[in-house]
Image (cartoon, rainbow, N blue to C red):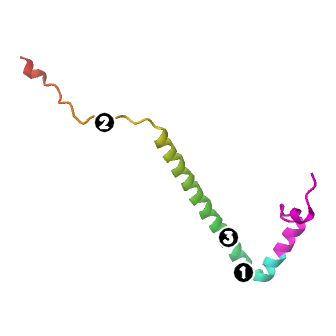
Amino acid sequence: MNIPHTLAAFGPLGTPELIIIAILVLVLFGAKKLPTFARSLGKSMGEFKKARDEFEHELTRAQDEAERPTIPQTAEKRQPVDSSRDV
């Protein structure tokens, strides 16, 4: 299957593209601010992952509750039998 050259540009990034992006980031942020930028990016990714995990946990819990059979509640409550009255 032949993919037109214009569509291939939107595919995965190769080594040359990553090098160009790294150079642009270095020029835009400078060498001094790059560690701060990387640290904040790492924290953001960690928080995003934590939020995603919590969301998946809530979906799983909701699905489990929806699949669990429900026991119908009776309107009347039975009184305990007092065995001392039988005498």
Q: Is residue 19 magenta?
A: yes
Residue kind at label 1, given as amino acid type: Lys
Residue receiving disc 2: 73
Mark 2 / mark 3, whichever is N-terminal: 3
Q: Report how far apart the C-alphas of labels 1 and 3 lie in the structure.
A: 12 Å
The x, y position of residue 18, in whole percent, is 84, 68
Would you say 57 lies left or right of 38 here? left
Residue receiving disc 3: 41
Would you say 20 lies left or right of 85 here? right
Badge 1 density bin: few <14, some 14–19, many ≥20, Cα 10 Å? few
Q: Report how far apart the C-alphas of labels 2 and 1 lie in the structure.
A: 63 Å
Residue kind at label 2, given as amino acid type: Gln
Would you say 58 lies left or right of 75 here? right
Range shown magenta: 1-22
The x, y position of residue 9, in whole percent, is 87, 65
**Residue at coordinates 17% horizontally, 30% vertically from top-left?**
79
Q: Is residue 24 above or below residue 65?
A: below
Mark toward the viewer: 2 or 1: 2
Q: Is residue 48 magenta?
A: no
Mark 1 / mark 3, whichever is N-terminal: 1
Would you say 15 lies left or right of 54 here? right
For the C terminus, give its image quadrant: top left
Disc 1 on helix, strand or loop? helix
